[in-house]
Image (tube, rainbow, N blue to C red):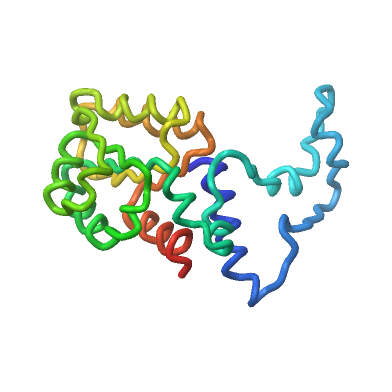
Amino acid sequence: MNSGSVNEWIRGEANRDKNLNLQPMPLDLQFLGAVPHAQLHDADSNHVGDRSKFCLEYDKGEFPDFVLAREEGRLDDELGGTVLALISHDAMKDRMLDFVIDYEHELSKFRTILTTGTTGRLIQDAVPSLSDKIKRRHSGLQGGDIEIASEILIGGCHVVIFFVDPLHPHPHTEDIRVVFAACMIQNKVRILSNEMHARDWIDKMIRGR
């Protein structure tokens, strides 16, 4: 969904693959006819440039590197400073509850869990152990999506898990788009927009499977 998420995925996949298919990271790719990498910085150049190195120079900035933290034995500390948002459309709330129940232990390690109103209430009822972590915003219809988008934009939310229902229209569609737009602007946030991606992310990045 954004380059920060893709770069994290690359690091995670590289870590899992390192004992099977040893390759330098970033990959040293060569393209026929590519211009020197330095020309990427030439504002007057009309060439595309050698984007192989440019695209694989991932950002090692503020977002925690869970793979490295797990290897160094400080994963709990990294999660303890990370804010997670859980959002789900009405038709996806049962799936969100199943997800939260299955990953209760991992979710309990995050510093804060932001939710829209109804999703947060349902999670608190289903998994009371997470109640103290959850900070409920308004429901989506009442601006909860926009409130979470604001947190994303100011760097107050690091991971967004949004179970989107693609089959039914939503009266606050524009508010939903604001969440995704905020993730595009604040590129360090991780955005996971369906259950499979969310489960895969926790299994790989946190459980280390």
Using residue 193 as the reference point, say whether residue 59 is left or right of it: right
Using residue 111 as the reference point, say whether residue 184 is left or right of it: right
The residue drawn where x is 47% and y is 51% is 77
Labels in figure, total: 0
| Vertical relation: 55 (above or below) 95 | above
Closer-to-camera residue (148/50): 148
**Residue 38: % across, % down:** 86, 36
The residue drawn where x is 72% and y is 58% is 25
The answer to whether residue 47 shows anywhere in this view is yes
The residue drawn where x is 20% and y is 28% is 138
Using residue 109 as the reference point, say whether residue 34 is left or right of it: right
**Residue 188: % across, % down:** 53, 38
Closer-to-camera residue (198/82): 82
The answer to whether residue 181 shows anywhere in this view is no
| Vertical relation: 30 (above or below) 160 | below
Which residue is most to the bottom?
A: 20
The residue drawn where x is 31% and y is 31% is 176
Using residue 207 as the reference point, say whether residue 15 is left or right of it: right
**Residue 139: % across, % down:** 19, 30
Could you say which quadrant of the image residue 183 lies in? top left
Closer-to-camera residue (134/122): 134
**Residue 91: % across, % down:** 17, 46
